[in-house]
Structures are given as structure tokens and as C-alpha cells.
Image (cartoon, helix red, strand yellow):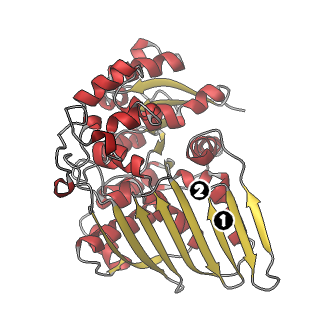
Amino acid sequence: MQQLTAIMIGAGARGAGGYAPYALDYPHELKFVAVAEANPERRAKFAEEHGIPAERSYASWEQLLEQPKLAEIAMICTQDRMHFEPTLKALDKKYHVLLEKPMSPDPKECIEMERAARDNDRLLTICHVLRYTPFWSAIKRVIQEGRIGQIVSIQLNENVGYWHIAHSFVRGNWNNSDTSSPMILAKSCHDMDVLSWLMDEPCVRVSSYGSLMHFHSGNAPEGSTDYCLNGCAVESTCPYSAPRFYLGEGKGWARHFTEDLSRDHIVKGLKETNYGRCVYKSDNNVVDHQVVNMEFANGATAMFSMCGFTRHQERRIQIMGTKGELRGEEGKITIMDFVTHEEHEITIPPQTTGHGGGDSGIVRSFLNEVRGYDGGESLTSASASVRSHLMAFAAEESRLNNGKSIELEDYYKKVTTFV
């Protein structure tokens, strides 16, 4: 099998921890030859793990992409608002690009990236990793086999987890839509994508409600302080205590603010970074719960619900068809036949890689698509992603306008007027 080479732009949690390990597990398939990362510790660690020489380690994507083309592939895993420029530059240099989701918080930039991939005759694949997992692939297969007939309606619940929403969307990098993306895009563009994929019909209209109901100063308990370790009187009884989480079950998540996971370094990070801030006194503005209603071209409907107030981080789906019903929670799928009343259960074995096997699955698929590239599109191509991204953008516009129903065709025309 032909080994492909790649450059990594952004060696954070998703780049270094999500996708790059594939090259360590399957070195005969993939090798990283350069890295661009602003954090010097992360940059050095990535270079050491992948045997990248000092002269191919860069502090910025601009420095890396100034060089002649160094590889077949560019993996771009920077923050949401840092996707557009390096993606266009990499495509112009004829790299095939694997881009972390979301494409961009700006719908016009999403459309421009799609066009740039087409104009440069390169793959631009977006990391909607759910499509590449055994769980979601099995659901798609059941639908395609006709086992539940035509889909009439889908209900999808995304249970974010109380600890995860506090980490990523109250204290973390995705807590403020002005610097990252709205919640429906940052967290739930996965869900918009998988709903679009399973339904396999154009979405024609959406409406949405949601708010930042809990994580704001109005709910700060008496005696709370700006930081959990700054003498907070209620820290020991607060569900969102930063020291309890990062020094306990969430110790691995402390890598977002320290490379050294010793107790002293974690405590130091909790005193000096946003990850130690009170969840009621942060600069967050993204919603902590949201619902989206969707209607598709054939009349089928879907309802999506995202909520941060759950114990576990999981997705649960119910698909109602004309011949049967499917219910799934990650690890198990149950199919119920309307004629025989039989129930068939599909058990998905536990996966050893992130996102239920989706992280390694998308890399494996992308490498095969690059090897056999003939001008076609990947499973989660830019064009497929633009469609589901527009669903998310329209849902956010609806939410901000008291749940007003948004026609997708009209919304697309409005967005593309000046593109």
C-alpha cells in the first residue's frame, strides 16, 4: 500500500490527539513531514512523536505554507475562525485537505472553500466523523436495505454531559460565538450532517429555540468567587467544580491547559487559565440547550435536541419508517418490524479510537480517496458539508428571531448574493 505524506496545521487535541495517531499506528500508510503549531510545547511534542526535523517545525501556518509543496495532504485542525485562510492557501498549493469541523463560522467562507476545492481539483473533506463510525454506518445500512421502509420522522438527542459543556462551552475554546462558533455549529454540526445523510433528502425549512439558561451571572450562588480555587464558599457542593473534575475523573481533559498532568501543574492551571473560572462568571455566550425542527423535500421531518444537563455524553436516535422503527444508543441498535413484531438487535463492539472509531475511520477513508482520486467527492466532502452547515446557520438565525421558520432556498440565495 502506498504511503502518503502529510503536513499538520494545528497540533492540538483534535489534530495531534484525534487524527495524527493514525500515522503512528499505521506508519506504512501515513507519515507527517511538517507541523505548524503556535504552542511551542505542543509543536515540539508532535515533532518528536512523528520524527519531524526542526527545520520542518513552524510556529505558524503562514510559515509552513510559504514553503514549496511538501506532501500530498494537509490536515488543518486550527480553531474555528482560523480555518478559512490556511484552507484556501493549501488548496491553491494543490494539497488534498482534511479539515476539522466546522468549516467556518461564516457561511460565505464555507461556500468559498467549496468552490476553491472544485477550482483546484482537490479533495476537501470535512471531519464529520460520525459517518465513519460502525454505529452510524450500521444505521445507514439498515435504512438503505429498506428494513424500516421510507423514513417519516427522526428524533435525535445529543446529550452533551454537564461536565463536557462546562469544560468546552463555558470555560473552553468554544464558549463564545464571537471568537469561535455558535453551539449548533461548534458542537452540533455533526448532528446536522448525520441527519442530512440519513434522510438523504434536501432540507427545505428549519425552526429553532434555545438559550443560555443556566450558565450566567444571574445564577451565581452566594459566596462564589471568580475562580474555584480563590476561596469559593460553595465549591465543594457545586456540580461544576473545576478542581473536582480536573483532579478527578476529568484529569485527561486537563491537557487542554497543561502538558504536565501532575497535581501541581493542574492546580497552577486552574489558578491561571479560564479552565479554573466559575461557570457563572465566565465570558461564555453560547446556548446550553437548543432544539431544531426540520422539514425535508419529501415531507419527512426531523427533531434535534441538544442539552448540556445530562450525566453522560451520548447520542440517542429514533427513526420512524413506514415498515418499522429503529432505536439506537451508541453501542446498540434495535430494529422493530411492523408485520412480524420481531425485534432485531445489532450490538456494536466498543471502539478503541476516538468518537466511536470515527477519528481513525475518516483518516483511513481519506487516504484511500486520495490514492484513488479521480475528480470525485469524498463521503464528507465540502459540498455535502455546506448543505448541513447551512442547516445549522439557518437554525441559529431562527433561534435569534424567536423561532421564525427559515426557508433554506431563500437563506442560500441571501448568503450567496455577495459570494
Depth check, front residue: 263 or 259: 263
Mark 1 lies on a secondary structure that is: helix
Please state the horizontal and vertical placement of residue 363, each as a whole percent of the image: 58, 41
Q: Can residue 377 be seen in this view?
A: no
Image: 408 above or below 263: below
Q: On the image, numbered disc 1 is attached to which residue? A: 140
Q: Nearer the viewer, residue 29 or 338?
A: 338
Percent across and percent down for residue 75 are 47, 37
Amino acid bearing label 1: Lys
The structure residue drawn at horizontal position 42% and vertical position 77%, both measured from the top left corner, is 293
Left or right placement of residue 103 versus residue 28 in this view: left
Q: Name the residue under label 2.
A: 131
User: Looking at the rendering, which quadrant does residue 393 occupy?
Assistant: bottom left
Q: Which quarter of the image is occupied by the N terminus?
A: top right
Q: Which of marks 1 and 2 is nearer the N terminus?
A: 2
**Which of the numbered marks, if any, corresponds to residue 373?**
none
> Which is nearer the eye, 143 or 218?
218
Q: Which residue is drawn at 54% across and 50% down?
A: 129
Pointer 1 with pointer 2, Cβ within 8 A: yes
User: The residue tagged with tag 2: helix, strand or loop?
Assistant: helix
| Label 1, residues with CA under 10 Å away: few <14, some 14-19, many ≥20 | some
Q: Distance between the residues labelled 1 and 2?
A: 9 Å
Whether residue 293 is visible to the viewer of this picture, yes or no, is yes
Quadrant of the image containing the C terminus: bottom left
Placement of 414 over or under 23, stated as above or below: below
Point out residue 259 in the picture as x, y percentages from the top left corner: 39, 22
Tell me residue 78's x, y (percent).
36, 39
